[in-house]
Each structure stands twice: as C-alpha cells, then as structure tokens.
Image (tube, helix red, strand yellow):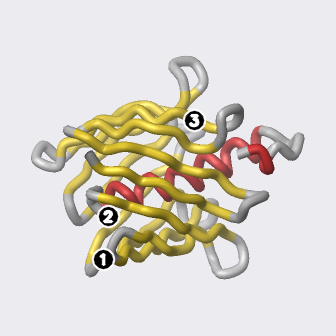
Amino acid sequence: MGTISGRVGESISGYDIKATVKNGVISGRIGGMVFGDDINLTYSMEKGFIKGRLGGATFGKSVEGYISPNSLSIRIGGMVDGKDLELEASHNSVYGRCGGPTLGFDVKIDFFESQAVGRLGGEFVGKDVRGSVIDVEPIIAGALFAITYYIFQVNHRNNSSGNSGRN
C-alpha cells in the first residue's frame, strides 16, 4: 500500500492531504475534518483511466480522465464549474497546468526519495507543496497535490467567512 501525506500552503492558509493508494483505489481526505473533501478514486495505468469523486454524493466534484505513468489528463467537476488538469512526469518531477491560461495555476513538484517539494501557482500567487510520498507513482501524487490546491481555491471562493485556519 502506498501513502501520500502533506500540506499545500502555509499552516494558516492551506490544506492537508492524506491518502492511501492500493490496488487501483485512492482514498483519503483533503482539508480538515470540517472543511475539506473525501477522496474516492479508482484508476488503472494499464487501461488508462482514472475516475471517481471528491467530496460527498450531493456536494462534491466528479473526476474523470486519462492516466499513464508519464501523463494525466482529467476533468475535475462539471463542464461549467470544473477545470481540466494536464500533467506530465519526467525525471522525478511532475509539471503541468490546472485550468486555462488565465484562470488556472501551474504545477511543478519534485520528488526525491520519499519527499515531495514544489509550487502550485506562480512565484507570488500560489502555494508551496511539502509532503511524504511512499510507494506511489509521481503522476498520482502530483495530481493529488494539484487537486488539493484546486479544492482549497473552490472552498475559499465559495466561503468568505475566513475558515482557512481550521484545515
């Protein structure tokens, strides 16, 4: 069984991620106990698919797309309120983009031994990534860190009451 755990953002303004990967199933949690989403995804590198749900059955986002050891192309959410995530993996790094050229963010995460370090967004607007990745393909770990930042953005866009410190 593989594990991913870490933080996207700072201690006050960011989200935790904790997930397990086993036999084509990714499960875990993004955010905290109150504000955040459950992770329920299935995938197959051989068949080239990844699909599932973030959050609950009523309030949540669908995930569906293509995955291989070196690339990922998925849609998070619906046609109107969702975003595309396009990633590539090469030389212990995962890089790409979530969203379009204007309303999106860059992904750049490096993996060394069991550590993940990187940046989501730009130099000034964005979040740092720090985490532990054990026995999980970098493309999957990179996607989960990017999805974590996307969920953080969605929840903070929809919730202006300043609850970012509870996750």
How many residues crowd mark 3 within 10 Å: few (<14), some (14–19), many (20+)? many
Above or below, 59 against 88 in this view is above
Above or below, 128 against 51 in this view is below
- Of 3 and 153, nearer the camera is 3
How many residues crowd mark 1 within 10 Å: few (<14), some (14–19), many (20+)? some
- Label 2 sits on what residue type? Pro
Earlier-in-chain disc, 1 versus 2? 1
Looking at this view, name the residue that lies furthest to the right. 161
Earlier-in-chain disc, 2 versus 3? 3
State the image coordinates of residue 46 (x, y, percent, origin top left): 10, 47
Residue position marked by numbered label 2 in the rendering: 138
Looking at this view, name the residue that lies furthest to the top. 58
- Label 3 sits on what residue type? Asp
State the image coordinates of residue 88 (x, y, percent, origin top left): 32, 68
Answer left or right for 125 relative to 111: right
Question: From where the camera sits, is residue 86 visible?
Answer: no
Task: Compute the Cα span from label 2 to label 3.
Answer: 22 Å
Determine which of the numbered discs, if any, sits on residue 157 in the image: none
Q: Residue at x 77, y 44 (%)?
A: 166
State the image coordinates of residue 67 (x, y, percent, origin top left): 25, 52
Determine which of the numbered discs, if any, sits on residue 92 in the image: 1
Q: Quadrant of the N terminus?
A: top left
The answer to whether mark 1 and mark 2 are in CB contact below 8 A is yes
Task: Compute the Cα span from label 1 to label 2.
Answer: 7 Å
Residue position marked by numbered label 3 in the rendering: 37
- Label 1 sits on what residue type? Asn
Tell me the element at label 2: helix
How many residues crowd mark 2 within 10 Å: few (<14), some (14–19), many (20+)? many
- Of 16 and 159, nearer the camera is 16
